[in-house]
Amino acid sequence: MLRDGTVFDDEHLPNEIVGRNRHMNEVTDALAPVEDGFRAENCFLFGPSGAGKTTVARAAVRELRREVLDLPTAYVNCWADYTRNGVLERIAKELVGAAVRQNAPIRELTETIQAGLTGPAVVILDEVDQISDSKVLYDLHTIHGVAWICIANREIDLLADLDDRIRSRVSVGYSVNFDRYDETTVTEILHRRAREGLDPSAVERSVLKRIAQLAEGDARTAITALRVAARKATSEGLSTIPVRFVESSLVDAKDEVRRKTISKLNPHQRSLFRVLERDGPLIQKHLYEKYREEHADPISLRALRKSHLPKMEHYNLITSSRDNRGRKYRVVPVDSAELTPLEDGE
Ligand SMILES: Nc1ncnc2c1ncn2[C@@H]1O[C@H](COP(=O)(O)OP(=O)(O)O)[C@@H](O)[C@H]1O
Ligand SMILES: [Mg+2]
């Protein structure tokens, strides 16, 4: 059944990117100046989870590296590195291999990065709506040759928090919008993944199509479901995946994706999630009070409202509704199929 399990890992970068030519072209256009030794245009990719944003960004950079040997590149996952220092420390390490002391001043970090570069460089800032201070985009702008590809779920004004003088100097050259995949594309993505990772006759196209139907345009959930189904079939000693496995595999896949998302939460989000699991639903004021008890170094409600809470809603970990006492938050139950939206006023 299984030939190569790594093909189903989220980090696996496929050789061919299916159905995203326009998106690939826009990103490679933004990066093209690098081929002549110049700084690339900054670009911003946004769209829902599982729509291929990270994959397209990484594939475009991979393509560029075929032309430009030794191009310094860095990938920052802003779930993990979300402070201004954290992002720059990660970039110093990945881009120029510099070890920097903790809590070094910003200036020292940018100078270290600059000193290690002799030409253009490209930085991917994934899940950029997690960063607590967008000044880091300006910091990067001050380093000659560095351009960024920023990735987020929603179209946000990346530079909104910068003051006008600074903002006018940093530009977002390209904005690329990713929609959910249609069923045919997800089926094709699954087909290629099966060809790479499973035995030749392990799964019929009709089964892949059924998975795609239920995955609602989310390639991550679809690929995870295919792996789950292959595992189930193997454990029952079958050599092909029967269609009756599909539905339960999707439930398991959604659960797995959710657990991975929870494990990525930053300390503030983790506290919020714990409080809501234990004491929810809670109106905003009470949620904030309990979060302050839970977290050793709490941030302002405004900061939570701006990025942390919307991000958790986006990933369907929590949901909110309004009533006359304000916004109320609750954890989305594991079997979200059963969830009916909260009525206003509940
Ligand atoms: N166009 C595509 N062709 C092949 N595989 C894809 C494509 N789009 C997404 N995938 C796969 O789907 C999964 C999720 O894609 P990803 O780029 O991480 O989505 P996003 O960053 O938008 O959440 C990954 O395993 C990726 O390899
Ligand atoms: Mg991604």
Image (spheres, rainbow, N blue to C red):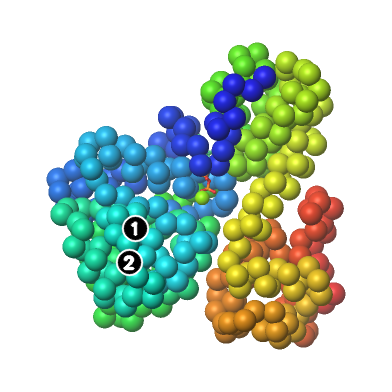
Q: Amino acid at mark 2?
A: Val
Mark seen at residue 100 = 2
Which mark sits nearer the N-terminus, 1 or 2? 1
Frontmost residue, 126 versus 182: 126
Q: Is residue 331 left or right of residue 73?
A: right
Q: Quadrant of the C terminus?
A: bottom right
Helix, strand or loop at mark 2: loop
Q: Amino acid at mark 1?
A: Lys
Q: Residue at x 76, y 61 (%)?
A: 332
Q: Residue at x 69, y 36 (%)?
A: 225
Measured as percent of width and height from the top left, residue 307 is found at 55, 71
Q: Is residue 315 above or below residue 221?
A: below
Q: Is residue 261 left or right of residue 280?
A: left
Q: Residue at x 65, y 68 (%)?
A: 270
Frontmost residue, 237 versus 20: 237
Mark seen at residue 93 = 1
Would you identify the image quadrant in which residue 200 lies?
top right
Q: Residue at x 72, y 29 (%)?
A: 231
Q: Is mark 2 within 8 Å of ligand 2?
A: no
Visible in this render: residue 129? no
Measured as percent of width and height from the top left, residue 206 is found at 70, 22
Helix, strand or loop at mark 1: helix
Question: For the residue carrying disc 2, how many other residues have a C-alpha within 10 Å: few (<14), some (14-19), or many (20+)?
Answer: some
Q: Is residue 70 left or right of residue 305?
A: left
Visible in this render: residue 165? yes
Question: For the residue carrying disc 1, how many other residues have a C-alpha within 10 Å: few (<14), some (14-19), or many (20+)?
Answer: some
Frontmost residue, 2 versus 44: 2
Marks 1 and 2 sit apart, C-alpha to C-alpha, by: 8 Å
| Farthest top residue in view | 201
Q: Quadrant of the N terminus?
A: top right
